């Protein structure tokens, strides 16, 4: 008998089993940060085969395949979808210990059934044929896959220049059936003043808003114009990807104007100039988020596009990113304090890709709890390389011991894959195991009402309150 990923997977105490099966298992999902393509949701995309659905956008799987020696032709190259799926199935048994092994089987079983079927080179053809017949059915189109996992809300990741036409089309659809899709304001390119494409991006922003952008104030005004457009189309949150945080000076308007001019002319900027400019824009946007009662998310610490070869062949977000290990404590606290000191710090979620920064993230969040809002500044869920068992457990233990776990907004997928939502189950099982062990070890009372409320809040209700209003 195969005992792999059984019904009580991770649930090693009586309390954990009760909490998961009676409380957590059937909770809906608020997935407030992901990278699903809005067009595919709005158009209710169908897929021709499992290879396209499962592998075309999932750089987690690509990374494991490369590590196992699969040639790029069978990852992002010109091999057929079936050949790519066969290559993935062939190497997956070798990924024991990697969360991809758990995720992939949960994805197969939860969406397509056949629970207990192991994915390997021998089973690949049968899985391909079985899923092929299912994918032609309406419930396996994009919206059906989301509803199958009880997803209530997805927060996509959208550039300020985006027309949001697909969000508008979906919002106007009479067939949403309880599913909500909202845009998230992601203005990274407007802050990357040292980047090669900065000037061209600002020109597009000028054209879209009908505003000249020759000063720092005009740039902020144009971004706020787009933010208002996003809010009118349902936006609940903003998101910023920050590779590293450096010390930043508070500059005058004229100094910021001069830096903007240099950036638009493509002139070299001193590192402190770029960072001071970026932080100034972020502070002004944060104040705008506060006025609009939006959530500000800061994703800190990826080191991107490290393989020139992979970047040239497959582009960015292709599995060649890793963890940045530079200090963040002092600049992060100063950034938040610039907004907090004028009572303009929005509800904020902080994520660190470097797991050694978890205590810094938690204790920094604790510095800015105010305004009568429970958990106003969040130590966000274990992110990217850390959304595995050790990473999630460490993040939640740090939050519980240095902060307040009960206010945690919980899990998100951060994924481009429509099959990634069983990761919420993975998270909820682990959460119940952690709390169950506390009870069994005498570290928490076996108070059913209290524990049920905490599990339900972390699994669903806290995120629902934050992102559905």
Image (cartoon, rainbow, N blue to C red):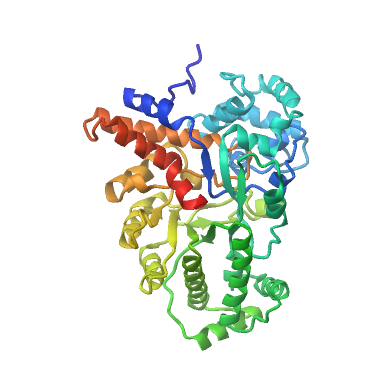
**Foreground of the two, 466 or 211:** 466
Q: What is the count of numbered marks? A: 0
**Is residue 324 in sight in this rendering?**
yes
Residue visible at 66% across and 23% down in the picture:
121
Residue 180 sits above or below residue 28 on the image: below
Residue 449 sits above or below residue 404 on the image: above
Tell me if 45 is positioned left or right of 245 in this view. right
Residue visible at 59% across and 21% down in the picture:
118
**Is residue 382 in sight in this rendering?**
no
**Foreground of the two, 320 or 424:** 424
Residue 391 sits above or below residue 196 on the image: above
* Residue situated furthest top in the rendering: 1
Residue 460 rendering spot, x and y as whole percentages: 46, 41
Tell me if 205 is positioned left or right of 154 in this view. right
Residue 383 sits above or below residue 85 on the image: below
**Foreground of the two, 167 or 414:** 167
Residue visible at 53% across and 83% down in the picture:
256
Residue 378 rendering spot, x and y as whole percentages: 40, 54
* Residue situated furthest left in the rendering: 442
Tell me if 345 is positioned left or right of 416 in this view. left
Residue visible at 58% across and 55% down in the picture:
306
* Residue situated furthest bottom in the rendering: 254
Residue 81 rendering spot, x and y as whole percentages: 75, 34
**Foreground of the two, 353 or 338:** 338
Residue 362 rendering spot, x and y as whole percentages: 34, 54
């Amino acid at each position: 008998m195969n005992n792999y990923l059984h019904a009580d997977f991770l649930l090693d105490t009586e309390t954990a089993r009760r909490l998961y099966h009676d409380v957590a298992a059937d909770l809906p999902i608020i997935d407030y940060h992901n990278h699903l393509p809005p067009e595919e949701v709005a158009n209710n995309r169908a897929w021709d085969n499992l290879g396209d659905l499962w592998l075309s956008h999932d750089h987690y799987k690509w990374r494991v395949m490369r590590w196992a020696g699969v040639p790029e032709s069978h990852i992002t190259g010109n091999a057929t979808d079936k050949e790519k799926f066969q290559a993935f199935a062939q190497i997956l048994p070798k990924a024991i210990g990697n969360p991809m092994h758990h995720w992939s089987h949960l994805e197969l079983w939860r969406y397509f059934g056949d629970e207990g079927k192991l994915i390997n080179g021998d089973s690949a053809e049968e899985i391909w044929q079985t899923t092929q017949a299912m994918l032609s059915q309406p419930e396996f189109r994009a919206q059906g896959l989301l509803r199958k996992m009880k997803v209530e809300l997805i927060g996509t990741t959208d550039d300020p220049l985006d027309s949001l036409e697909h969000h508008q089309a979906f919002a106007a659809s009479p067939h949403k059936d309880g599913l909500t899709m909202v845009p998230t304001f992601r203005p990274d390119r407007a802050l990357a003043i040292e980047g090669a494409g900065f000037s061209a991006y600002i020109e597009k922003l000028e054209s879209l808003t009908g505003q000249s952008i020759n000063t720092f104030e005009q740039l902020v005004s144009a971004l706020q114009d787009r933010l208002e457009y996003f809010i009118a189309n349902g936006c609940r949150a903003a998101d910023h990807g920050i590779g590293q945080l450096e010390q930043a000076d508070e500059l005058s308007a004229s100094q910021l104007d001069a830096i903007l001019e240099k950036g638009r002319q493509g002139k070299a900027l001193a590192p402190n100039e770029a960072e001071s400019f970026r932080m100034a824009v972020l502070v002004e946007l944060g104040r705008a988020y506060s006025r609009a009662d939006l959530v500000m998310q800061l994703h800190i610490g990826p080191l991107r596009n490290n393989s020139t070869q992979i970047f040239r062949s497959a582009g960015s977000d292709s599995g060649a990113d890793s963890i940045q290990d530079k200090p963040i404590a002092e600049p992060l606290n100063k950034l938040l304090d610039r907004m907090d000191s004028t009572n303009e710090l929005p509800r904020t979620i902080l994520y660190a890709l470097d797991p050694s920064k978890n205590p810094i993230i938690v204790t920094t969040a604790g510095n800015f709890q105010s305004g009568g809002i429970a958990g106003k500044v969040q130590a966000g869920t274990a992110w990217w390389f850390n959304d595995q068992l050790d990473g999630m457990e460490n993040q939640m233990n740090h939050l519980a011991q240095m902060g307040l776990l009960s206010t945690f907004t919980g899990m998100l997928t951060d994924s481009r894959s429509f099959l990634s939502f069983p990761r919420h189950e993975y998270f909820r099982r682990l959460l119940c195991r952690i709390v169950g062990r506390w009870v069994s070890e005498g570290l928490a009372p076996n108070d059913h009402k209290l524990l049920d409320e905490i599990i339900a809040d972390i699994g669903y209700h806290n995120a629902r309150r934050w992102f559905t209003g």
